[in-house]
Image (spheres, rainbow, N blue to C red):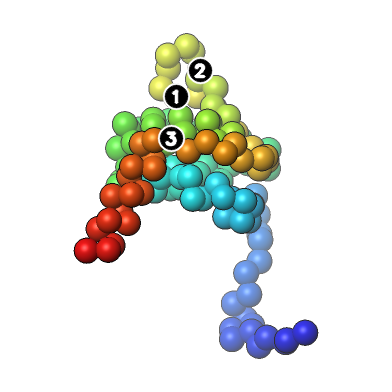
């Protein structure tokens, strides 16, 4: 077994007064590869904002102000995709209301379907990389 040296032992991460964490299975089980950049950003934000039960109640306009490179439409779509991936649950305050309560869920099993839109967007990115 190889032993590693910790370059900055005084700076080893500690969890203090926070519940924020992200399950490594988001990466290792293929969720990350199915997420758009705004999905990843919203997921990280919700994980940071959540209490120990994964709950938070941030309004979309507050998230938009806190993370200024998102706009409301991107956030709305990201929220929908995260619900479809079964990574979060969202319950609006009232039917049709853009705001409500979020729960970051425990990571389950990934469904094997990728939307045609995401496939096409990835293909465009890879085509640009090949130029």
| Mark 3 neighbour density, 10 Å: few (under 14) some (14–19) many (20 or more) | few
Taking the spot 62% from the left edge, 51% from the top edge, the residue there is 29
From the viewer's perspective, tell me whether residue 20 is left or right of residue 92.
right
- SS assignment at label 1: loop
User: Circle 3 is placed at which residue position?
Assistant: 115
Q: Earlier in the sequence, mark 2 or mark 3?
A: 2
Q: Earlier in the sequence, mark 2 or mark 1?
A: 2
**Where does the image place residue 20, in percent across and percent down from the top left?**
60, 51
**Where does the image place residue 45, in percent across and percent down from the top left?**
48, 46
Q: Which mark is residue 93?
A: 2
In the image as oriented, which residue stretches furthest toward the top? Answer: 95
- Can residue 102 be seen in the rendering of this structure? no
* Disc number lying in front (3 or 1): 3
User: Mark 2 to mark 3: distance in Å?
Assistant: 29 Å
**In the rendered view of the protein, which quadrant contains the N terminus?**
bottom right
Please tell me which residue lies in front, 129 or 105: 129
- SS assignment at label 3: loop
Please tell me which residue lies in front, 4 or 35: 35
Kindly indicate whether the residue at mark 1 contacts the one at mark 2 (C-beta within 8 angstroms). Answer: yes
Please tell me which residue lies in front, 81 or 116: 116
- Is 91 situated above or below 95? below
**Where does the image place residue 123, in percent across and percent down from the top left?**
33, 49
């Amino acid at each position: 077994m190889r032993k590693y040296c910790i370059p900055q032992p005084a700076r080893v991460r500690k969890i203090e007064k926070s519940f924020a964490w992200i399950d490594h299975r988001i990466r290792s089980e293929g969720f990350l590869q199915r997420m758009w950049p705004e999905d990843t950003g919203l997921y990280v934000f919700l994980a940071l904002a959540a209490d120990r039960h994964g709950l938070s109640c941030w309004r979309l306009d507050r998230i938009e102000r806190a993370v200024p490179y998102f706009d409301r439409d991107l956030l709305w779509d990201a929220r929908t995709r995260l619900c479809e991936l079964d990574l979060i649950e969202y319950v609006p305050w009232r039917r049709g209301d853009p705001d409500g309560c979020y729960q970051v869920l425990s990571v389950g099993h990934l469904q094997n379907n990728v939307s045609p839109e995401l496939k096409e967007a990835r293909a465009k990115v890879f085509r640009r990389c090949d130029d």
